[in-house]
Amino acid sequence: MKKVFLSLAVLLLLVPAAWAQGGGHISGTVYADTPDGNVPLGNAHIGIFLADGHMPVAGGMTDSLGSYSVNVRHGNYQVRADKWSFIGEWYDDVQRRSDATVVTVTDSSNAEGVDFVLASFESNGGSISGTITDAGTGNPIPGAMVTARGSSNWNMGHAYSDTAGNYVMTGLRADTYTVAAGKEGYARTEYPDSVVLNGDDVTGIDIALTPYVQTGISGTVTDLASGLPIAGAHVVAYDVDHRFFCRMGYTGEDGTYSIQLRPGEYRVQAYARGYVEMEYPQHVIVTADGFTENIDFALETLHFGSISGAVSDTAGDPIGQAYVVARKLGNRFAQHT
């Protein structure tokens, strides 16, 4: 929603007056839905979108009477209203843009009466509550994250389970929600049925999470000559089947490392400052049974030397400030002076 607000604010400053030349306007009133009826809502943001476009092309704000009027060129548009602490919507009273009513501005008619009635999160909210437990033991799981996602991305909520495994999500608008829960060490699990809210409180949405076996690789990085552990070494695992996927780990003071990885086949390399980089001699297989251990590296100390000489022209006269490059065979990096 903040991105929408920002876009509208920019448009208010940047849309030139010439935009309205050869055009008309879209106007209407935005109301707040209150227990006492509809009340004009000032300072609501209005976004105007071309029916076949993705970004807002014009925008405005309502005055103290909730009214707005935005100049646009002739064309077909979809209109959205938003205000902080209220549930934004597309015209005409829908949450999804795909369901929005298209309004048309022509040389003979404007789009007037494009009105909105916005409900506040506080006044129109229901709740979903339940308990999160371990599927194996039945014990409550504290700190599990529970999410609810409605038919519109604007309708969502989340909560964390307490020490008794209980959670409650409040302020949810009337909609049909998918509820799911997850926590590290457990597989994310969706509640088997959709949860329908109509401003009421729905209880008993309980979810049992199944523990999963953590998988990955572990090992030790040591100095080849002394056998002593190397702290702070980088170990990188590259997925053989997905070339752009990799995970990195670092060794502790005792030279050990652990990288959590999904099951698969990996190339594993180790790096440390002052040492020659090393690739594990064969691909490492990670299975669903757990960690593949003892993927160890013994790194050779990097020894530095120098190359020196003189640069002269064909007459034998020295050439000052010449540029000299040394490139290791098979290596794309170079040292220069």
Image (cartoon, helix red, strand yellow):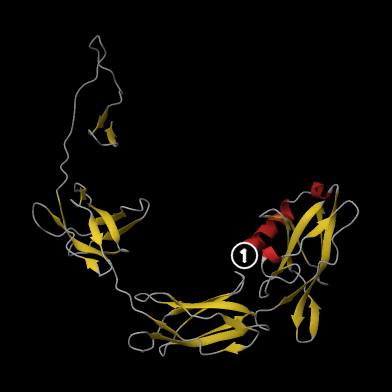
Q: Which residue is mark 1?
A: 2
The percent coordinates of residue 235 (x first, y second) are 25, 56
Q: The N terminus lies in which quarter of the figure?
A: bottom right
Q: Extreme front residue here?
A: 192
204, above or below 64, in the image:
below
- Judging from the image, what secondary structure is the residue with disc 1 in? helix
Q: Is residue 46 visible?
A: no
Q: Is residue 81 left or right of residue 284?
A: right
314, above or below 228, in the image:
above
Residues 279 and 45: in front is 279
Q: Is residue 69 left or right of residue 118?
A: right
Q: State the image quarter where residue 133 is shown.
A: bottom left
Residues 211 and 323: in front is 211
Residues 321 and 93: in front is 93
Q: Residue at x 73, y 56 (%)?
A: 51
The percent coordinates of residue 68 (x first, y second) are 81, 65
Q: Residue at x 15, y 60 (%)?
A: 229
Q: Residues within 10 Å of mark 1 (few under 14, many from 20)?
A: few
The percent coordinates of residue 19 (x first, y second) are 79, 48
Q: Extreme right residue here?
A: 108
Q: State the image quarter where residue 260 is shown.
A: bottom left
Three-letter amino acid code at the position of disc 1 = Lys
Q: Extreme left residue here?
A: 226
Q: Is residue 158 left or right of residue 80?
A: left
Q: The C terminus lies in which quarter of the figure?
A: top left
Q: Is residue 293 visible?
A: yes
Residues 62 and 308: in front is 62
The percent coordinates of residue 121 (x first, y second) are 65, 79
Q: Residue at x 28, y 35 (%)?
A: 334
Q: Residue at x 74, y 72 (%)?
A: 93
